[in-house]
Image (tube, rainbow, N blue to C red):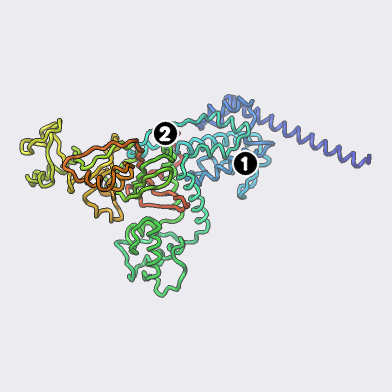
Amino acid sequence: MNKKIIAGIATVLIVGIGLFWYSNHRRSDLKDELRESLTGEKSGVLSQSKFSAQIQAFYANREYLEVWLFNGSLSNSGEELLEQIENSKYDGLQPVDYSLEEINALSSDPEKENKKFRNLSTDEMLSLELMLSDAFLTLAHDLENGKVNPASLDPNWKFEKKESKIDYLHLLTEIGAGRSVEHTLQELYPHSELYARGREAIEELYQIQANDTLAWEFAQVEGAIEVGEMHAAIPALRKRLMFWGFLEPYEIKEATLFDSIMFAGLQDYQKSNGMKPDGIIGTLAAESLNKSPQDLIDIAAVNMERLRWMPKMDWDQEMVLVNIANYQLDYMHHLDTAFTAKVIVGKEYNESPTFTAPMSYIVFSPYWNIPESITNDEIIPSINKNPDYLSQKNMEVVSGSGEVVKASKVNLSKDQGYRVRQKPGGDNSLGLVKFMFPNDYNIYIHDTPARSLFAKETRALSHGCIRIQNPDQFAKILLDDKEWDDEKIQKAMHQENEEVVELDRKIPVVLLYMTFWADKDGKANFRSDVYDRDSALLKALRSQKSSLDQA
């Protein structure tokens, strides 16, 4: 054999052996560093981690062999985790919460999109390995449970507490055995199409933001601007209608004029965003048009967190879904919407809570048993001004046993055990039917005599209960019985005495507060934050503190 060839082969073998020795030597050094760090013989890198016990057990079980690194650079699992950390923004989370900046700082090319990790010292490899383990578990926790603890933030969140079922040591062990990081984290997402579609919508918003060249200074609008009027905010609002695709560029003769072309584009925008398409730039339209892509990303992030708070439920089952922020009720059957109705929800100082409870019966021609708070705050003052108030309002006083007594014989301010109720009839505040899902908050769905209120764009007008448009149609679809035809339902709704009808099954009622969601077509929907709940949650979500710290 040629001597040069032999020499070449020898050189390759020597280099290969050297690299093998160097690689094993570095791995041995890292194993020693991991052992010393995790067994307390050295200053612990995980001193601030909430998962230090699980991480220590994980590495001890694998004899302190790294999982996120290989030969001094990121392993396949490490590269996959880094991508998942970066993509956590599509969940409405902040990649910086999962040590992204610290991880990237160890990169040999931190300015490049595809980071490389080369020539790391043993201490740097130790820091990177442990940071990635902590980041993985923190992200896993936040995806399953949410970053923020709802109990510490939202008093109107009445869903049962979501209990974590993650075995964090098991999660790490699966990754160490070669399981996909992406698939492992995806299994922790809420099992809801709402969440999956929401992620896609947020990713699209980030793409839109990347191409955004508009200035988003707040365009002040007081009152309303109608077509044909001039206003300083018109140029900015016109550009935003063009930005969102509701106007094509056109020749503008007078920049501050609200012209007919912009009027038509505004109507399309209003219709697409759940507003009355009246072509008037009022409070809601101006508020919506002032939101930049980043503002919409923030709103979406808040609502993705709410979905992570939700206890596990079967979204494929028959259910009644009420989105308080959208003023809408949907009767769902196998994920299809079989019935939709406008609703009226609680006023800002009588906010409708969010919770779930099973609907079990319907009450036709109901009495309205007036809550003590309304009796004290509204009924008694009205009686003091007008002694005939109760009879004029078709109300009566009853004892604790339900016996009707003369109002003149009772002092409601002093006498205990008496209450006021309104008799069945067209002027009853509950209307002609109510739908009962017993709960601790005395909330139910009911008809209303004030049906003109459904024409309003903003419908936060009740004492907390949900008033529904077209209650007769809702009753018919819930009863699902040929015997209960339109005629029988109307008769039941116009009786002198109430009639209780038990449903043949219990139907979950879910009251949500969602100011963002993506529909089946992938379209992002945004609604006004009528109860001003989003800002506090966004602040908590964007802070460095998580529910792990608040537990």
* Residue pictured at 40% horizontal, 43% vertical: 333
Viewed as shown, does residue 207 lie left or right of 118? left
In this rendered view, identify the residue nearer to me: 420 or 69. 420
Say if residue 532 shows up in the picture: no
In the rendered image, the vertical position of residue 450 relative to residue 46, given as above or below: below
In this rendered view, identify the residue nearer to me: 331 or 52. 331
Please name the residue that numbered disc 2 is placed on: 162
Q: Which numbered mark, 2 or 1, is in the foreground of this view?
A: 2
Look at label 1 and name its amino acid.
Answer: Glu
Q: Residue furthest bottom?
A: 253
Image coords of residue 68 (percent x, y): 62, 36
Please name the residue that numbered disc 1 is placed on: 79
Image coords of residue 58 (percent x, y): 58, 27
Q: Quadrant of residue 316?
A: top left
Image coords of residue 23 (percent x, y): 72, 34
Determine whether label 2 and label 1 are within 8 Å by CB. Answer: no
Image coords of residue 373 (percent x, y): 19, 39
